[in-house]
C-alpha cells in the first residue's frame, strides 16, 4: 500500500454535509496532483413506475445544473484553479454505484461526508458511508458534518497488530509527509499487563526498524474499549485525523458491532484503510 493518489472519488447528494467534505478532497488533490471525480447516483423511483423515464430525465437535468453551479463555485476560488475535476451521473443504488466506480475508474481514495441531519442525509451519509467503509478496497476518508477543514497536522493511528498494520502505517507516514504532520501510534487494551506490554514493545521495535519518520510516537492505552480510548486521546490533543485498518470480518480493533458507531460518532475525520482479507477463500468483504 503506497501513497499513489491519481484519482479521488467524491460522492455527493448536494446536501450541506456533502459540501463540507468537498474542501478536503480539493486540498488533497492540490497536494497530490490527483483528479477529483464528483459523482451522484440517481436511484430508481419505484413508487412511480409509469413515470420513471420522465422522472429520471428531470432529475438528471437538475443534477447537471447543480454540477454547473458547484464547478463555477470551485473555479471562482484561486486556490482550486489548478485542480482537475470530472463529474459523473450514475443510476442505481448509491453504494453499488460507488463500489463500481472505485473499480471501473481505478480510484485511489474516497472522500465522503458522514452523519447528515435530515432523513435523506442520514440515508446517504449514514448507512451508505458505513457500507462503503466496510467494502471498499481503497482508503476511505470520512468527514463528519461538524469537522472543519484544516491541515492534517496531528494524526492518530490505531493498531491491534494486524498483519497489514505495518504496511498501513507506511502509507500513513507518506500521507503525513504531505502535511508535515506528526503521528501518534496507539494500542488500546483493557489491561496493561506484562504480556500486553511485550506485544506493544515488539510492534514498536518492528515499526522503528521498518519506518524512518522522526515525527512519530507510540502510546499504550488502558481502556474498556477502543471507542472510549480513542475519544479520550482525541480530547487530550488536537487530533486532525484518525487512521485505522479494516480486515475481512472486523474493523481491525473496534469490532463489527462498533464500526458504524465509530464512523459516525467522531467529530474528527476518520480514514479507514483496507487490510488483507483474513481468509484465503476469496476477497468478499462484509
Image (spheres, rainbow, N blue to C red):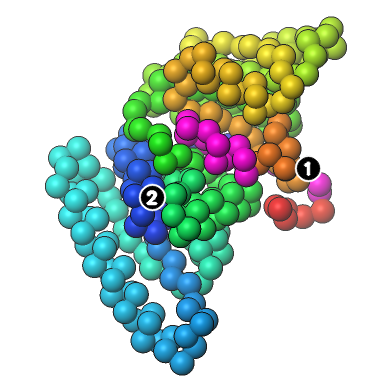
| Residue at position x 81%, y 49% in the image | 280
**Residue nearest the observer in this picture, 3 or 70:** 70
The stretch drawn in magenta includes residue 278: yes
Membership of 34 in magenta stretch: no
269 lies left or right of 233: left
Quarter of the figure with residue 228: top right
Identify which residue is drawn at 34% across, 33% down: 149
Real-space Cα distance between discs 2 and 1?
A: 33 Å
The residue at which mark 1 appears reads as 278
Callout 2–callout 1 Cβ contact below 8 Å: no
Task: Say whether residue 25 is visible.
Answer: no
Secondary structure of residue under mark 1: loop
Name the foreground residue: 101 vs 239: 239
Image quarter of residue 55: bottom left
Describe residue 134's horizontal placement relative to residue 15 as left or right.
Answer: right
24, above or below 167, in the image? below
Pointer 2 local density, CA inside 10 Å: few below 14, some 14–19, many at least 20: many
Mark 2 or 1: in front is: 2
Q: Position of residue 139 (x, y in %)?
A: 54, 42
- Compared with 53, 4 (above or below) is above
Range shown magenta: 260-280
Label for residue 18? 2
Quadrant holding the N terminus: top right
The residue drawn where x is 27% and y is 62% is: 67
- Judge by depth and name the residue closer to the eye, 32 or 37: 37
Q: Secondary structure at mark 2?
A: helix
Q: Position of residue 243 (x, y in %)?
A: 56, 30
Q: Dot 1, crowdedness within 10 Å: few (<14), some or many (≥20)?
A: some
Q: Position of residue 16 (x, y in %)?
A: 34, 49
Amino acid at each position: 500500500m503506497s501513497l499513489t493518489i491519481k484519482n479521488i472519488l467524491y460522492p455527493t447528494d448536494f446536501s450541506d454535509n456533502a459540501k463540507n467534505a468537498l474542501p478536503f478532497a480539493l486540498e488533497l488533490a492540490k497536494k497530490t496532483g490527483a483528479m477529483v471525480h464528483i459523482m451522484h447516483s440517481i436511484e430508481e423511483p419505484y413508487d412511480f413506475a409509469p413515470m420513471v423515464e420522465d422522472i429520471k430525465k428531470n432529475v438528471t437535468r437538475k443534477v447537471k445544473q447543480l454540477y454547473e453551479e458547484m464547478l463555477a463555485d470551485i473555479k471562482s476560488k484561486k486556490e482550486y484553479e489548478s485542480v482537475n475535476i470530472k463529474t459523473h451521473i450514475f443510476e442505481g443504488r448509491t453504494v453499488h454505484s460507488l463500489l463500481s466506480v472505485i473499480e471501473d475508474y481505478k480510484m485511489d481514495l474516497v472522500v465522503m461526508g458522514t452523519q447528515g441531519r435530515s432523513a435523506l442525509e442520514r440515508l446517504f451519509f449514514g448507512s451508505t458511508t458505513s457500507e462503503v467503509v466496510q467494502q471498499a478496497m481503497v482508503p476511505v476518508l470520512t468527514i463528519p458534518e461538524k469537522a472543519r477543514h484544516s491541515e492534517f497536522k496531528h494524526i492518530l493511528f490505531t493498531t491491534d497488530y494486524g498483519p497489514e498494520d505495518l504496511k498501513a502505517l507506511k502509507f500513513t507516514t507518506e500521507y503525513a509527509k504531505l502535511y508535515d504532520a506528526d503521528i501518534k501510534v496507539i494500542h488500546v487494551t483493557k489491561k496493561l499487563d506484562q504480556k500486553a506490554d511485550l506485544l506493544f514493545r515488539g510492534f514498536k521495535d518492528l515499526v522503528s526498524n521498518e519506518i524512518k519518520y522522526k515525527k512519530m510516537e507510540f502510546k499504550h492505552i488502558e481502556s474498556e474499549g477502543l471507542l472510549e480510548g480513542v475519544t479520550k486521546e482525541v480530547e487530550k490533543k488536537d487530533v486532525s485525523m484518525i487512521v485505522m485498518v479494516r480486515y475481512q470480518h472486523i474493523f481491525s480493533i473496534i469490532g463489527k458491532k462498533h464500526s458504524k458507531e465509530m464512523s459516525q460518532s467522531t467529530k474528527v475525520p476518520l480514514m479507514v484503510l483496507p487490510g488483507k482479507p483474513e481468509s484465503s477463500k476469496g476477497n468478499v468483504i462484509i
